[in-house]
Amino acid sequence: MMDDVMIIKPTKEDIKSAYDVFEVSIRDAFEKEGLGDLKEDILAEIENKRNLFSYSLDNKDLDVFFLVAKLDERVIGTISFGPCGTDIKKCTNHELDAIGELGSLYVLPHYQGQGVGSILIHAMIKHLHELGIEQFCLDSGYKRAQRKWLRKFGEPYKIVKDYWGKDFDHMVWLCKVNDYV
């Protein structure tokens, strides 16, 4: 089935199904982290990703871009690359401000655990390599994602204890593109 997944740059026709990915997978991620009661945070995160996605489509020459995983004309996953975000800047005391961030990796829950996220990551890293980008960073406050990133990217560049509250750490990774192409 994953052979049928296409990884492409999104178009305006992909907005609705990409928005659906954000809506469903962000709510699901918060629920699975035991944070489903943080309704305002969930809505803010969904809105932030929608705005970033729309911005990337409207400003093709800028430094934020997405790739999407599509199955049967429907977006089932997203990934982005752009300037590093506020959390990375804060957590690293601005040490990584010049490094771009791999982010917005969301896959519909029904397709999680089937390699869609890995396909998106690999496609984005290949794209970064083609652009001559040598490093990227990524971060996560989600414990489930942190376990995956520890397996895939090794030890984090920085761990900020209790960043999101007691026992909710934030992790930041700094990676070399050539290590993953």
Image: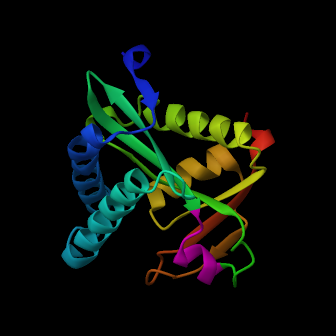
Residue 78 in percent (x, y) is at: 40, 44
Residue 69 in percent (x, y) is at: 40, 33
Determine the residue positioned at 39% across, 60% down.
55
Nearer-the-camera pick, 141 or 24: 24
Determine the residue positioned at 32% across, 33% down.
111
Determine the residue positioned at 65% across, 73% down.
159
| 64 relative to 100 in the view: left or right | left
With respect to residue 136, does 99 lie above or below? below
Could you tell me which quadrant the C terminus lies in? Answer: top right
Could you tell me which quadrant the N terminus lies in? Answer: top left
With respect to residue 169, does 104 lie above or below? above
| 113 relative to 42 in the view: left or right | right
Determine the residue positioned at 39% across, 61% down.
52
| 166 relative to 178 in the view: left or right | left
Residue 47 in percent (x, y) is at: 27, 67
Q: How many marks?
A: 0
Is 13 one of the magenta-colored residues?
no
With respect to residue 71, does 121 lie above or below? below
Q: Look at the magenta stretch and give its main secondary structure.
A: helix
Residue 114 in percent (x, y) is at: 41, 28
- Name the quadrant containing residue 87: bottom right
Nearer-the-camera pick, 165 or 63: 63
Q: Is residue 155 something that shows in the picture?
A: no
Coloration of the structure image: rainbow
- Name the quadrant containing residue 142: bottom left
Nearer-the-camera pick, 140 or 49: 49
Magenta range? 83-91
